[in-house]
Image (cartoon, rainbow, N blue to C red):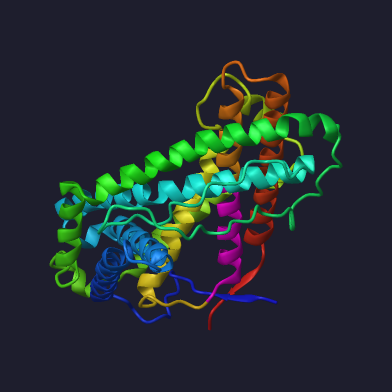
């Protein structure tokens, strides 16, 4: 079934001007301030863990949308203010997201180890420290349940060729090693987020967002300037980046280069993953631009939704593979532990390939413009 797709380049659509951008930014700034207030109110309250998690997620969500809109529509905004705000919002969103990222990565890797080894003798994951407590500086519960992505929609997974008994020998120690490393990283991320939210840097960002909720620094010509050319440019950057991806070869079940690089002594990010991460960022910017054109609410585009989910899977699997490879570089670990981590790394790189294949399938589906 063909999916209707909003086209920012449609010349017959109603013109949207800088006034709409101002309205969108004011709305996102209001959401930011509301989320911050809820975070402070519920962070230390008994039974307020779920509300704190929701508030932290909303805080990051609005920060990303403000930052993305400042990037796409920067010619219509005061240049100095915009260039000062964007990196600060990116810093805030990234800092608040690290704790959840480490938590999800650990759960994903432990689940994969259980699946690969058939063992349940892996370390139980430490209870989540949850959302950052702005008011009291404590930890709240409420870990999000994360399920490792299945291979549905991707290439068929080859039959396991390892001796499961040999893998089980090292799986428990591999899981314990990952648990120690990623729990430590998550604890540090939690402390870093607490420090960030109590810093003068954060208060300066919050003050600027508070001003943005009532006053958007548009250029003099912005209120009557159309937004569609800038939104179309964002879509074109996305299309160009996708065109540069090796879609015809995406989804190969065994990527030897990826495995060799991941288990090499070089801890640098995987060179194959960078262009895919960039497409994920550009897809997000395109979605935000469409939100601005539609006043904040857009019809669901199944194609873009599926593509975005595949790219999220790609990021999660690539980061999990890197964590397994880093753990395998730990000095003086037992050979069985290193073996289990190597199998785990290969499994996650296979998930990377499956996610690329899923993106290819989603992106190449035919769409029609909305009438």
Q: Could you say which is closer to the camera, residue 367 or residue 203?
A: 203
Q: Is residue 24 above or below residue 232?
A: below
Asked whether residue 295 is in view, the answer is yes
Q: Residue at x 61, y 21 (%)?
A: 264
Q: Seen in the image, is 266 located left or right of residue 30?
A: right
Of 81 and 168, nearer the camera is 168
Residue 227: percent from left, percent from top: 32, 69
Determine whether 13 is above or below 358 in the image: below
Q: Quadrant of residue 68?
A: bottom left
The dominant secondary structure in magenta is: helix
Is 315 a magenta residue? yes
Q: Quadrant of the N terminus?
A: bottom right
Residue name at image x 48 percent, y 71 percent: 7
The answer to whether residue 47 is left or right of residue 306 is left
Q: Is residue 218 above or below residue 262?
A: below
Residue range (magenta): 300-316
Q: Residue at x 71, y 39 (%)?
A: 347
Kindly give the residue lying farthest to the front in the view shown. Answer: 46
Examine the image and state in which quarter residue 288 appears: bottom left
Measured as percent of width and height from the top left, residue 204 is found at 15, 53
Direction from residue 230 to residue 170 in the image, left or right: right
Residue lying farthest top? 332
């Amino acid at each position: 079934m063909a999916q209707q797709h909003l086209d920012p380049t449609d010349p017959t659509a109603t013109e949207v001007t800088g006034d709409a951008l101002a309205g969108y930014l004011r709305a996102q700034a209001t959401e930011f301030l509301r989320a911050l207030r809820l975070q402070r109110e519920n962070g230390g309250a008994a039974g307020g863990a779920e509300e704190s998690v929701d508030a932290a997620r909303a805080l990051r969500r609005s920060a990303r949308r403000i930052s993305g809109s400042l990037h796409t529509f920067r010619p219509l905004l005061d240049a100095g203010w915009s260039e000062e705000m964007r990196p600060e919002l990116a810093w805030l969103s990234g800092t608040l997201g690290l704790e959840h990222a480490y938590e999800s990565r650990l759960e994903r890797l432990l689940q994969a180890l259980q699946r690969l080894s058939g063992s349940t003798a892996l370390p139980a994951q430490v209870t989540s420290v949850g959302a950052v407590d702005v008011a009291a500086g404590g930890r709240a519960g409420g870990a999000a349940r994360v399920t490792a992505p299945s291979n549905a929609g991707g290439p068929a997974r080859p039959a396991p060729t390892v001796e499961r008994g040999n893998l089980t020998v090292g799986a428990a120690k591999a899981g314990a090693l990952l648990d120690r490393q990623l729990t430590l990283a998550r604890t540090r991320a939690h402390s870093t987020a607490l420090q960030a939210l109590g810093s003068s840097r954060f208060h300066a960002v919050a003050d600027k967002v508070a001003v943005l909720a009532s006053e958007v620094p548009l250029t003099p010509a912005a209120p009557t300037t159309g937004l569609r050319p800038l939104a179309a440019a964002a879509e074109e950057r996305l299309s160009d980046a996708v065109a540069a991806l090796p879609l015809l070869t995406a989804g190969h079940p065994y990527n030897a280069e990826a495995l060799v690089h991941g288990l090499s002594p070089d801890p640098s990010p995987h060179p194959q993953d960078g262009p895919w991460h960039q497409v994920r960022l550009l897809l997000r910017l395109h979605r935000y631009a469409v939100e601005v054109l539609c006043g904040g609410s857009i019809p669901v585009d199944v194609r873009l939704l599926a593509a975005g989910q595949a790219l999220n899977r790609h990021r999660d699997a690539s980061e999990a593979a890197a964590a397994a490879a880093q753990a395998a570089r730990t000095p003086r670990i037992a050979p069985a532990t290193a073996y289990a981590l190597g199998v785990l790394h290969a499994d996650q790189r296979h998930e990377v390939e499956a996610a690329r294949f899923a993106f290819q399938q989603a992106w190449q589906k035919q769409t029609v413009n909305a009438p």
